[in-house]
Amino acid sequence: MTFEEEFRGVIGTSVTESTPWWPETPSHSNRPNIVVIVLDDTGFADLGCYGSEIRTPNIDRLASDGLRFRNFHTTPLCSPTRAALLTGRNSHNVGMRFLSEVDTGFPNCRGQISATCGTLAQILDTNGYATMAVGKWHLAPLTETSHAGPFHNWPLGRGFQRFYGFMGGVTDHYTPELVRDNTRIRRDFGDDYHLSEDLTDEAVLFVREQTSLAADRPFFLYLAFGATHAPFQVPVHLVEKYDEVFAHGWDRIRLERLQRQIELGIVPQGTELSERPQDIPAWHDLDDRQRRVATRLQATYAAFLEHTDTQIGRLLDALGGCGVLDDTMIVLLSDNGASHEGGSGAMQVLAPYNGLSEELSESERFLEAAGGRTTAPHYPAGWAMASNTPFRRYKQYVDGGGVNTPLLVRYPHRIGDAGAVRTQFVHAIDITPTILDVVGIDPPRSIAGVPQRPMDGRSVAPALDNPDVPAGRRTQAFEMFGHRALVHERWKIVAEHVTGEDYAQDRWRLYDLHTDVSEHHDLAARQPRLVEQLAALWWREAEANGILPLDDRPMRDMLNGGHVAPAYRRTRWTLYPPTYVPFGLAPNLARRAWSCRADLLAGEGDGTVFAQGSALTGHGLGIIDGILVYEYNALGHRTRVSAGMPVPTVPARVEISFRPARERGGSVRLLIDDVTVGEGRIPLTLDNVSFLGLAVGRDSASPVLSAGVLGRLLRLDLRLLEERPT
C-alpha cells in the first residue's frame, strides 16, 4: 500500500476505537517466470539444432523440449535488435537505428530508447515481477556510462531491479569492465576467470534467491551473453578438438550444414545455398598456411560457442533444481547474423577493427594460444558465410544472413508438439507482445506518467499452440547503412546500397520466400511490376516507422564523425586518481595532437600515471625504475620512449606531448618541469586502441605498463590540441 491509497478502515481516538484495514495483496503466483537469453553475432546455422557440427547439447535440449523458428528475423546490428526485443517497437521508432554510441540529431538515431517506448522489464516490474538483467546492455549512450551517470538509460532506469554486466557493445572476456546495478566495480581477475561463467553465476544466484525467498513471485531474467561476439576468448584446451572438424573448410561445411538443415526440417527440401560472395575466396584457393590459421580461428569460435552452451546448461540445471523449469517460459535468440568484421581473420581483433590486415606470420605466432589471454581472435569472413547457411551476406546487411537468426521457445504449458519447427514470420518486435500475451498483461497506455507509443509487434503466442496459425503481421521493413529490405507475405525485396550513391539508383532484388528461403533466385527481372509495388510499400513503411532520413555513412564514419554526442567532442579532462574512464567515454587520441600533464607530490617509487587499454594493446605513461616512460603497444608491437634523467623525488610536473604524423604514427616528447628529457617516434598508433578504458594513477585490470599504483599522483590534465596530421 502507498500513502496515496485511500484508507478504508476507521480511525478513532485510540486503537481500541479504530478498525484497521489492509489492501489486498495481488497474487502473481499463477504467472510463469520469463527467461530471455540473447547470443551475440551467432549465425543461423551455428547451433546443433539448426544443423551445426558444433556441440550445443543444452541449447539443443531447449529445441527438443520446445520449438525452433525458421523464419525469425532481427535487425542486422546489436543495439537496434535489443531495443526492438525489449520494447516491441521497431528500432527506428524508439530512437535506436544504429549503435548506442551515436546520436545523429534525428529522432530515429538518438542512441537511447525513447521514454514513450517502455521496456518489457518496466511492464513486468509494475505487475509484480522480480526483474534482473545480466550481461551486455548496449542501450545507453556510451557518454552516459561512467559511474558519474546519468543513470536513466541504465538497466535500473529501464525497469530492471538488478543488473550485473557490462554497458558497452564489446569487452574483454578475461578482464571485462563490470557494473553492478548503478555502480562500476573493481575486482581482481584470476587465471581461471571468464566473463560467461561469471554472468551465469549471477543468473543462477538470482534464480536461487528468488525461488528461495519469494517463491510466490514470478521473475524475469534477461541474460545477454557477450559471446559469441569477437573477441573469441575461451579456455585453450577446448579449442583443439575442433581443428579436424573444420580442416575441410567453409565451402564443405556450408554444404554439410544445409544437408542437415534439410534433414532436420529447418529448411524445406530443395533449398539451395546462396552463392558465395565475390569477396570470399574458395577454400581450395587458400594456401596451406592460410587454411591452418583459418581452421584454428574457426575452432576457437566453435569452442567459444560450446563454452557458452555449457553455461546455458548450468542455468537450465538451476531452474530444474529449484523446481521451476517447466513453469518458466524460456526464449533464446541471436541478435543478428554472424559477423564478417574479422576480414581475413586475426588473432588480435583490433587489427581488422582498425582497418589493418594481420600478417600471416603474426597469426601463426599465436596459433597454439588462440582463445587464451594473449589473444583476441576473430575468424575470416568465410566462416561468417558458413555460420549464416543457407543465407547470403552477414551482420550489417539486410539480406537473410544479416537478419535471419535462430529463435527457440520452451514453455511446456503452451507447447504440445515439442521438438517441432515453426515457419511463421516472427520479428524481434514480436517477442515482447508474445510474452505479455502469455503472462496475461496488456501493454500499458502510459508508464510513469509518460504516454506510450503503441507496439509495432504482434503476439505470436497462438503459434506456440498451433503450427498452422497465420503469422501476426504481413509486413516488415528493414534498413541499415542505406541497405533496405521489405518482407511482405511471401515476398522479399532487397536493395544493397553503395555509400554516396543516389538511392534511386539502387537495384531491388525480389525473392519468393515460399519457394526460395535462402534468397537465391532473384525474380526482379521477371516481375518488375511487383518490385515497383513492393518498393512503394517500403517507402510507406519507412515513413510510418521513422526510418527516414536514410543515412548511408559507413560504421567507421558514424563512430568517429563530428555528429556524435557532445561528450565525444570534449577536448580537455582534469582527472584525479584513482579515476577510471570507461571504454565508451575515454578520450579518443587517434590521429590527434595531445598532451598530458601530471602533478606529482614529493615521494619515491614507481607507478602508472595513466594507462589506456590492456596487455594486448594500449598505451600508458608511468615511472619505471625511477625513469619517466611512455609505451605504446600496437597489437603486440611495443615502442618505448624513456626520459634521460630520473623523476625528482620532490614535487614535480611530468608531461608528454604527442604530434601525429601523416600516417598512423607520430612523435613523442617527454618533459619534467617544462624541460624536455626524452623524445622518440611511435611508428603505429590505432584508431581503436582497446576494449578497455583509461585508468588514472594505476594500471588497468589487464596491465599496460605493469607499473602499479602511483601514490604520489595529485592530478592529471589531458588536452586534445588542434593540430592535425600533416
Image: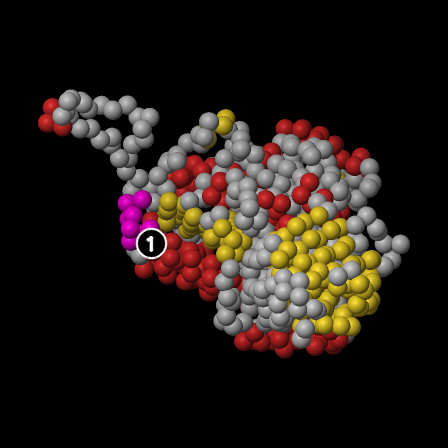
Name the residue nearer the viewer: 183 or 494.
183
Is residue 646 visible to the viewer in this orientation of the structure? yes
Magenta stretch encompasses residue 213 = yes
Locate residue 426, reporting x and y percent: 53, 42
Q: State the residue at coordinates (62%, 75%).
A: 369
Residue furthest to the left in view is 16
Name the residue nearer the viewer: 386 or 590.
590
Of the 4 image quadrants, the one containing the C terminus is bottom right
Q: Quadrant of residue 682?
A: bottom right
Classify 588 as above or below 382: above
Magenta residue span: 209-217
Name the residue nearer the viewer: 135 or 19.
19
Circle 1: element type: helix
Is residue 534 visible to the viewer in this orientation of the structure? no
Query: For this view, does 431 lie left or right of residue 45?
Result: left
Q: Which residue is mark 1?
A: 209
Classify 406 as above or below 682: above
